[in-house]
């Protein structure tokens, strides 16, 4: 049995390392599209999924936690426990057709999850459990626009938003022969703050106009549920040469949910101290707190397949199709500038040696690549397409033998280059994303036969 002190040291080391990287990275992000709905969708999936173009519907792996499709939890392996954590570092460049551009950087933890197998030793049913916390959407924008009033006085309008949503989940999956079904359940919650601020500079007459601002703070939350299934088809089994060809099929859905919340509203006028730059409130035009609100969070559907060939080496190639029903989104019954989005994802993974007998460390590295293409859910500037190209690798912390394969610890990496929008739109975005993940695992709850 793995000692509690050893597991605790590993968890503490990963946690401290994560915090040190996050604190040293830029935290400011700026995405104008996050103004709509509940913000930009945070990429789903662990680092292994991201390195393969974000596929996950049919993917299952005993070394990572694939929470895209909870049916994959049955694959953890007998008496195996996993801790999976990721760190995201993003850089995005916004450009317009006038040649202006702005670059922002940020870093955050995209998921923290743990899983284990609870299957009894002689059971014919696989049973896995996973739990964790991850962000779902992110609101982060800061836009300034200059103008001039009919009177000739100049203005600067600031649009600012911060916040996002998260979900704490607990999932389980049961596998019988080639079929598995899994569910995720938990609580989805978050906050979103929006500020519209109009600074008026009285160029024609001192004190002629007063600056004003509107502040809105939303708090919301509700239970959620996700369901997934996977099925494995044996295409070819060569027992003599220990070669197997399989086809994995998968499907999942995140069900629509009705979130309840409250909203605070503040409308006020203020003066700007020219020497200090601070605000002085003149009048609270209107202020209300804890206004009941309702948010309809839309459903998502995903389908996919994966071909797997395993002998001395391992090859996996898969594809997903995902539909997000954001046209159903409602805030107190009101629509937003949103439509149904879709995405096609293709990716693969290759491991030169899976037997553990090779003397080369690089033969046990997991090499990954993929791409994705789709329609974004935003309609503010027409139909916006997006694409991304991904590369990734999984590095074993040490070269393992076949007997140690269930105790392997992996450092996963993924790199993505992509674009949202094009030159025909008012604004387009080029982004670079680097994700680092730690998949730590070991055998647990083994009854000792000898001391």
Image: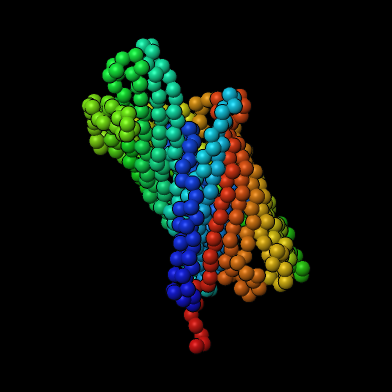
- Is residue 394 depicted above or below 53 in this figure? below
For image coordinates 49% across by 83% down, the residue present is 448
In this view of the protein, which residue sits in the foreground, 133 or 253?
133
Q: Please state if 141 lies on the left or on the right of 89 as rendered.
A: left
For image coordinates 56% across by 51% down, the residue present is 435
- Measured as percent of width and height from the top left, residue 422 is found at 61, 29
Q: What is the quadrant of residue 341 in the picture?
A: top right
In this view of the protein, which residue sits in the foreground, 418 or 403?
418
Q: Please state if 247 lies on the left or on the right of 95 as rendered.
A: right
For image coordinates 50% across by 50% down, the residue present is 25
Residue ranking furthest to the front: 275
Q: What is the quadrant of residue 220 in the picture?
A: top left
- Is residue 67 depicted above or below 215 in this figure? below
Residue ranking furthest to the right: 241
Q: Count how many numbered circles sit on residues in the image.
A: 0
- Measured as percent of width and height from the top left, residue 383 is found at 56, 27
For image coordinates 46% across by 42% down, the residue present is 28
Q: Is residue 326 in view from this perspective?
A: no
In this view of the protein, which residue sits in the foreground, 272 or 112?
272
- The image's colour scheme reads rainbow
Q: Please state if 83 lies on the left or on the right of 285 as rendered.
A: right
Q: What is the quadrant of residue 396 in the picture?
A: bottom right
In this view of the protein, which residue sits in the foreground, 318 or 119?
318
- Measured as percent of width and height from the top left, residue 313 is found at 72, 63
- Measured as percent of width and height from the top left, residue 160 is found at 40, 33
Q: Is residue 238 in view from this perspective?
A: yes
């Amino acid at each position: 049995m793995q000692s509690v002190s050893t597991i605790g040291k590993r968890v503490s080391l990963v946690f401290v390392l994560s915090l040190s990287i996050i604190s040293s990275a830029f935290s400011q992000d700026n995405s104008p599209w996050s103004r709509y709905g509940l913000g930009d969708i945070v990429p789903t999936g662990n680092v292994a999924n991201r390195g393969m173009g974000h596929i996950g519907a049919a993917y299952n792996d005993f070394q990572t936690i694939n929470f895209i499709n909870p049916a994959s939890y049955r694959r953890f392996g007998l008496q195996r426990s996993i801790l999976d954590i990721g760190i995201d570092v993003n850089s995005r460049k916004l450009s317009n057709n006038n040649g202006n551009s702005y670059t922002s950087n940020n870093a955050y933890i995209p998921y923290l999850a743990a899983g284990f197998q609870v299957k009894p030793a002689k059971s014919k049913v696989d049973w896995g459990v996973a739990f964790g916390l991850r962000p779902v959407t992110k609101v982060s924008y800061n836009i300034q626009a200059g103008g001039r009033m009919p009177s000739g006085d100049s203005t600067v309008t600031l649009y600012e938003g911060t916040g996002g949503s998260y979900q704490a989940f607990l999932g389980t999956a049961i596998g019988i022969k080639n079929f598995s079904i899994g569910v995720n359940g938990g609580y989805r919650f978050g906050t979103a703050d929006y500020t519209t601020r109009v600074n008026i500079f009285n160029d024609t007459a001192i004190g002629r106009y007063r600056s004003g601002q509107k502040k809105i703070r939303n708090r919301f939350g509700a239970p959620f549920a996700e369901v997934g299934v996977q099925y494995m088809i044996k295409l070819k089994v060569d027992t003599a040469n220990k070669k197997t060809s399989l086809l994995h099929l998968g499907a999942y859905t995140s069900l629509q949910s009705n979130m309840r919340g409250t909203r605070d509203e503040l409308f006020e006028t203020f003066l700007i101290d020219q020497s200090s730059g601070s605000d002085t409130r003149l009048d609270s035009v209107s202020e209300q707190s804890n206004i009941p609100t309702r948010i309809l969070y839309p459903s998502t559907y995903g389908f996919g397949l994966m071909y797997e060939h395993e002998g001395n080496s391992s090859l996996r190639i898969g594809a997903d199709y995902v539909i997000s029903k954001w046209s159903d989104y409602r805030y107190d019954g009101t629509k937003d500038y949103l439509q149904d989005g879709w995405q096609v994802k293709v990716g693969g993974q290759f491991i030169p040696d899976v037997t553990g007998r090779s003397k080369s460390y690089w033969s046990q590295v997991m090499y990954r690549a993929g791409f994705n293409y789709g329609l974004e859910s935003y309609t503010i500037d027409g139909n916006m397409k997006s694409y991304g190209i991904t590369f990734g690798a999984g590095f074993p912390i040490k070269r393992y033998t076949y007997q140690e394969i269930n105790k392997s610890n992996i450092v996963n990496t993924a790199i993505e280059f992509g674009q949202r929008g094009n030159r025909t739109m008012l604004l387009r975005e080029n982004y670079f994303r680097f994700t680092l993940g730690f998949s730590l695992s070991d055998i647990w709850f083994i009854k000792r036969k000898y001391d």
